[in-house]
Amino acid sequence: MPMIDRRRLLGGSTLALAATLLPRTAFAATITVPKAPVARVEPVKDSYFGETLTDPYRWMEKSSDPDWLPYLKAQNDRTRAVLDALPDRAVLLRRIEQLSGDTVSTGKVQRAGGRLFYQQRPLGADNFKLFVRDAAGIRTLVDPVALSAGSTGHISLDWWEASPNGQLVAYGLSKDGSEDSMLHVLTVADGRALPDRIGNTQSAHPQWLKDNSGFFYTQLTGKVDTPERFLDAQARFHRLGTDPAGDPILMKRGLVADVAFDKIQTPFIQVYPGSRFALLGLADVRPEYRLLIAPLADVLANKARWRAVASFEDEVSGVEIVGDDLYLLSNKGHPRGRLLRTSAAAPDLATAVEVVPQGPLVIEDLARARDGLYLRIMDGGISRLRKLGRDGRIVDIALPFDGTIGGMFATETEDGLLMSLSGWLTPTGVWSVDVGGRVADTGLTPKPSIDVSAYETRRFFASAKDGVKIPYTLIYRKGLKLDGSHPTWISAYGSYGAAAYTPSFAGRSLALIDAGAIVGYANVRGGGEYGREWHKAGQLANKPNTWRDLIAVCEDIYARKYTSPAHLAIGGRSAGGITVGRAMTERPDLFAAVVDGVGWSNPLRYVVEQNGYGEEPEWGAIAVESGYRALKSIDSYQAVRDGTKYPAVLLTTGVTDPRVAPFHVAKMTARLQAASTSGKPILLRVDYDAGHGVGSTRGQQDREAADTYAFLMWQLGSKV
């Protein structure tokens, strides 16, 4: 596509625009904050294992309550009145729009049938599109922006998968960030949509047959916005041109007596080119899954006798089939992972051959190419790359900079690898690795015209209470004076064994840094930066380590004189809402502000939301005492205490959020507004055209960033 020189349109360099931002002290203006809406109080008492808890805002869990939408509107109207009046929010927004508009973002990439498919948000575009590149050039296959024209809200491309011959694409579309996908199929030659449409296909994971005649997929069966939404999913097969209502159900709970599993576990069927076998996986929120195997022909005939490969207790988190060899990434007894090989025809973990032993670094994932298996390695938040060649040799592949491999894209018909690679100050690009291990930028993602020479990053380690070293990174403008006065925003996550805050191009956050702030990220326990041990140290009863690691990081930053409590804010999204919510309720004196984005604030009430029961392996089950104790410990809403001086808080939600129900931050907002005696604002920002953020447009993300940064500079920007 044609590229526009945004720098020229702006009439100067990035740094020239940065100079137009007001200095820190300009953000200290006084803002009149309207009184908060008073939420209806209807206490409900619950008893758990000899304890009684009171919930004053239980009514908010019912979206049908006549006060629910008026309450959200009143809170959001108040928040808009405050945020829109903040000094230089408009200037921040212009800078953010420039940064995001100048940045092309590329997601998934797939090679199939001599074509290259890729999902990309082009220069200045508002949403991701699906493109194909072949001998005829580059064409747009799916354009959600065009599909959204003339309708309220917006449409997003949730997922897609090209057929092996590159002639067909199955893809999912949803409205307003709901992720409630409708599966579609198109022909690549002319972009024509086929009549095949299948609903309830969020995370459908389509797996094409090698003859391109159809695909396996996973379908949800529960009703939207109910606790049953993600329970009892089923695996099916669709043959093109047939009525999806008649698609055979190949696996669901209770269908096969020999394959019993829990309602929270989702079945999926995986096929591998060149293999006569199919794998059945059973997955929940754990990073590992249960695996079974059967001949593909038997699966298609719906008469498979599934043979066990690995249980959840075997902690297998990655798998590939090469011919009749089955490769398994196993973590049992080896928390940083090792690669095993066994027979696909007669799998036996007890006699499997270790082909890549556990080392000092974590094996995160594997991808099969014609020349071998590529291994993504995690080094405490930094990605590394290795290859197991067809000759059995293991080689390290040097990357051009310390960063994050966001995805590996390989195919068994071609040598080498395509991968997404990003650094804190290096924009994300699609890089290639050839058979000799040489790494090169493909140029698929054009480099933005953003000058990063004025910024620097530093990595430190804080000591937790138990002596464990917690890594964190700070990004700021060069020449910073260490006097403890700088506005600082530290984000943390720490859940599901996911290494969440690894190097990713600073992008929009450069606007906040240009305004005088420091932006940082803490790799707290509960994530996967150092393998399964790191995850388990911040899981279930060990979860308090997660927010106390964040507290330790903040105290370390103070000791290094980057900032002080009057100028520091913490932020977290989704499960990161636990991290910042509990850090705030445990140490409200330590922070000037908190940003809680679509956060899980009231975990004890997971039983009434659609993404609830499936979370039990990570947090605990309320039906057993140990689970209740663990859930209570992470519940920020229940931890709020009357008469406490809480910091300023900005909470955000999207009304179509399928992952964290909006009642979490709504109840947390009401509770904080009623309890806090600090006089600092507690604000709730509501996006009526968004969900968890997964399908949000660039414009939506820009506006949320501007609101967040203006709020932070308002609360952190002046010396006290």
Image (cartoon, rainbow, N blue to C red):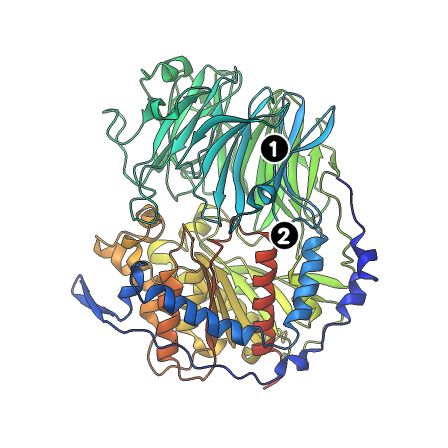
**Is any part of residue 630 visible from this angle?**
no
| Neighbourhood count class around disc 1 (C-alpha, 10 Å): few under 14, some 14–19, many 20 upward | some
Residue at the farthest left position: 50
State the image coordinates of residue 291 (x, y, percent, origin top left): 38, 29
Please report the residue visible at 23 percent of the width from the left and 25 percent of the height from the top: 257
Tell me which corner region of the image, top left, top right, bottom left or bottom right, holds residue 18. Answer: bottom right
At label 2, the amino acid type is: Ser
Please report the residue visible at 53 percent of the width from the left and 76 percent of the height from the top: 82
Q: Which mark is residue 512?
A: none
Residue at the farthest front position: 150
What is the distance, in whole Å, between disc 1 and disc 2 at their CAs?
Answer: 18 Å
Q: Is residue 52 left or right of residue 59?
A: left
State the image coordinates of residue 505 (x, y, percent, origin top left): 66, 53
State the image coordinates of residue 20 (x, y, percent, origin top left): 76, 72
> Is 652 placed above or below 658 here?
below
Tell me which corner region of the image, top left, top right, bottom left or bottom right, holds residue 385. Answer: top right
Q: Is residue 227 left or right of residue 539?
A: left
Q: Is residue 529 left or right of residue 434?
A: left
At numbered mark 1, what does the secondary structure look like: helix, strand or loop? strand
Q: Which mark is residue 409?
A: 1
At numbered mark 2, what does the secondary structure look like: helix, strand or loop? loop
Q: Quadrant of the N terminus?
A: top right
Q: Which mark is residue 504?
A: 2
> Is 574 placed above or below 252 here?
below
Please report the residue visible at 78 percent of the width from the left and 42 percent of the height from the top: 2
